[in-house]
Amino acid sequence: MYKEFYGLRESPFNVNPDPRYLYLTRQTQEAYANLTYGIQSKKGFILLTGEVGTGKTTLLNRLLDWLRTQRATTAFIFNPRLSVTQLFDFMMTDFGIPCDSKLKSQVLLRLNQWLLERYKSGESAVLIIDEAQNLSAQVLEEIRLLTNLETSTEKLLQIVLAGQPELEAKLAQPQLRQLRQRITLRSKTLPLSLEETTGYIHERLRIAGATDPNIFSEEAIASIHRFAKGIPRVTNLLCEHSLINSFVEQQKPVRKESVEEAAREFQLDEFDSPPPVAPFTPSSEAAPMVKSLLQNLANLVERMGQQDPALDSHRERKP
């Protein structure tokens, strides 16, 4: 609707995790480097955590694109509310491993044989589990046991667990300490700073074909960052609807008023920072009562000092 008006080839702020639009902040670059290094070095377990909407799934999709260039076979589990049997079924199907038996022992034997074949041919196998904070403790333990599939020198299966901060809390439970000890690399995605939000918006506009980098005013970007609190997913939502609001008004560039309107539409203004609390000032009617109470308190402190000389000496020592 607004693409022609703003000179765009495509919508730049869709919320789907398109890896083309991954914006590499310093923290995201570090997380991506940890993921690729851990898989190349066959470290076994890698952990990726971050708040909702900070770009974990987009980062995983970029990782999947890279793995396709590395002759790696992947299984990507995006709905982890699975039983142990369902997990193995999903994994074997996504890896493309045929197995006639449903017995767990037979499935593991077939998986081990397949992994050894990949190892001999110089190929890697990577299991990626998104939203892993929803995995049960029983399933997490079964995933840990998969790392026992190894040669004398390296792990045959590389596993990436990605999830919200609750995943770290779950892994801190005593019954999962063996899994926690096997995690060799940890990475995080974080909210964007104001400077990063500016770069994020400009980069997405550029990828979408914009020739004018100033589609959003500086005040509008500052307002987006304030309402979105640096969360990329919320930033996309505000940018998309701010563009629509500005297009309806035929405005260039997008102004902060359009952002504020979009924030109200999604009730984001309700979560904005509360106004500072004004200092308490007694009314004219209450002032004499407050003055009397303060005087009585001062008299009480003075009498206590007379009854207990230690209080006076303590006051004298205070700097």
Image (spheres, grey):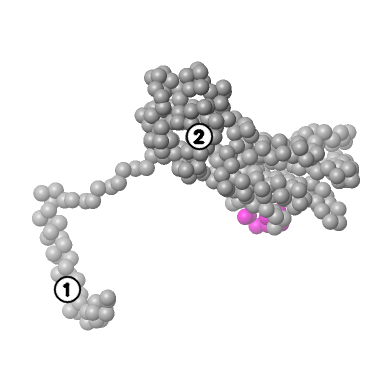
Residue drawn at point x = 80 percent, y = 33 percent:
93
Amino acid type at image mark 1: Glu
What element does badge 1 sit on?
helix
Q: Quadrant of the C terminus?
A: bottom left
The residue segment tinted magenta is: 170-180
Q: Position of residue 309 (x, y in %)?
A: 22, 82
Of residues 230 and 5, which is closer to you in this image? 5
Instruction: Out of 4 and 242, give the one closest to the viewer.
Output: 4
Q: Residue at x 51, y 22 (%)?
A: 7
State the mark number for residue 234: none
Q: Secondary structure at mark 2?
A: helix
Residue 100: x %, y % from top left:
88, 33
In the rendered view, tell whether residue 24 sits above or below residue 150. above
From the viewer's perspective, is 142 left or right of 222?
right
Amino acid type, mark 2: Ile
The structure residue drawn at horizontal position 67% and vertical position 37%, both measured from the top left corner, is 62
Q: Position of residue 292 (x, y in %)?
A: 12, 60
Q: What numbered label is drawn on residue 201?
A: 2
Q: Write the residue at 34% across / 43% down.
A: 274
Q: Is residue 269 above or below residue 148?
A: above
User: Residue 302 — which label?
Assistant: 1
Is 215 colored magenta in this rendering?
A: no
Asked if one can make out residue 60 in the rendered structure from this viewpoint, the answer is yes
176 inside magenta stretch:
yes
Asked whether 213 or 269 is in front, the reply is: 213
- Asked if residue 284 lies left or right of residue 127, the reply is left
Above or below, 262 against 311 in this view is: above
Compare residues 73 and 311 and report the one nearer the observer: 73
Q: Is residue 303 left or right of residue 97?
A: left
Q: Which of the two discs, 1 and 2, labels the residue nearer the N terminus?
A: 2
Which SS type dominates the magenta stretch?
Answer: helix
